[in-house]
Image: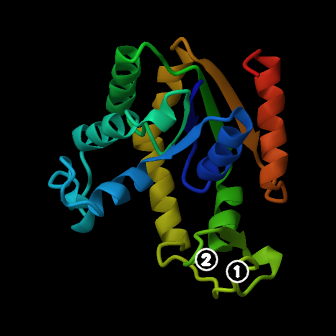
């Protein structure tokens, strides 16, 4: 099964993608991880193209598509993928359709996380990260250090209200049109509205699984 998550920054795509991938026994693919892997290997064929990431420049759709196409050729992605952070534009969606079609597959399921701005602000402004094991926590949990490895938790510099609102604006302009694209595709389209900041990741996952059952994709 090939699954695409839609949703604005802070909607929980990465978290829910990881949980669902484990549940379905398929792989969770993060485009960020693919870029980091290539950047750590100067001999990789795409190494020159991804240098724009180090320079802080915008990565073109063409480069992102090449990175994803290269990544999903790995044997571990053969049985299915939950995509995290891809596609972000209509051009990327077309490219993904082509990539999967060439492999005899297609996007089977799209999960649209419709999370309100108030909930997103609450989540991101209270977000804390472990710089060692990369786990994510929230201030409401009361941790000052990672409960797993003991490393002091940090906050990202761009986790501020002004930056978050700008990212949400960009999402609406560039990524939100994917909703219409996938509503008119062969994929099963599921929309889940989250307007309660007290809901945990497990709560949201339970709702996703229930919606999948209702739509006969689980």
Mark 2 Cα shell of 10 Å, populated few (<14), some (14-19), many (≥20)? many
Pick whichever of labels 1 and 2 is earlier in the sequence: 2
The percent position of residue 32, horizontal first and vertical second, equals 42, 54
Camera-side residue: 4 or 159? 4
In the drawing, does residue 105 fall left or right of residue 14? left
Q: Residue furthest front?
A: 75
Query: Residue at (55%, 27%) from the top-left corner?
Result: 79
Quarter of the rendering occupied by the C terminus: top right
The percent position of residue 83, horizontal first and vertical second, equals 52, 38
Q: Secondary structure at mark 1?
A: loop
Query: Residue at (35%, 23%) from the top-left corner?
Result: 99
Q: Is residue 103 above or below residue 139?
A: above
The residue where tag 2 is placed is: 130
Camera-side residue: 116 or 151? 151
Camera-side residue: 44 or 183? 44
The percent position of residue 46, horizontal first and vertical second, equals 20, 48
Q: CA distance from mark 1 to mark 2?
A: 6 Å
Q: Is residue 95 above or below residue 76?
A: above
In the drawing, does residue 24 fall left or right of residue 35? right
Mark 1 Cα shell of 10 Å, populated few (<14), some (14-19), many (≥20)? many
The residue where tag 1 is placed is: 146
The percent position of residue 124, horizontal first and vertical second, equals 62, 66
Quarter of the rendering occupied by the N terminus: top right
The answer to whether marks 1 and 2 mark residues whose Cβ atoms lie closer than 8 Å is yes
In the drawing, does residue 51 fall left or right of residue 204? left
Q: Is residue 130 above or below residue 202?
A: below
Q: Secondary structure at mark 2?
A: loop
């Amino acid at each position: 099964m090939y699954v695409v998550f839609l949703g604005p920054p802070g909607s929980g795509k990465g978290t829910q993608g990881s949980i669902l991938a484990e549940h379905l026994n398929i792989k969770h693919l993060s485009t960020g991880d693919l870029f980091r892997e290539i950047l750590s290997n100067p001999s990789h064929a795409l190494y020159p193209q991804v240098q724009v990431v180090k320079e802080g420049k915008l990565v073109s759709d063409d480069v992102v598509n090449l990175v994803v196409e290269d990544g999903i050729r790995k044997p571990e992605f053969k049985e299915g993928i939950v995509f995290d952070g891809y596609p972000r534009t209509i051009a990327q969606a077309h490219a993904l359709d082509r990539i999967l079609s060439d492999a005899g597959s297609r996007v089977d399921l799209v999960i649209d996380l419709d999370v309100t701005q108030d909930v997103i602000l609450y989540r991101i402004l209270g977000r804390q990260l472990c710089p060692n094991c990369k786990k994510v926590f929230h201030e409401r949990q009361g941790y000052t250090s990672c409960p797993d490895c003991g490393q002091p938790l940090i906050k990202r510099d761009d986790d501020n209200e002004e930056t978050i609102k700008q990212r949400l604006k960009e999402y609406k302009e560039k990524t939100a049109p994917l909703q219409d694209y996938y509503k008119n595709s062969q994929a099963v389209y599921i929309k889940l509205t989250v307007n309660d900041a007290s809901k945990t990741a497990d709560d949201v996952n339970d709702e996703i699984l229930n919606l999948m059952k209702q739509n006969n994709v689980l």
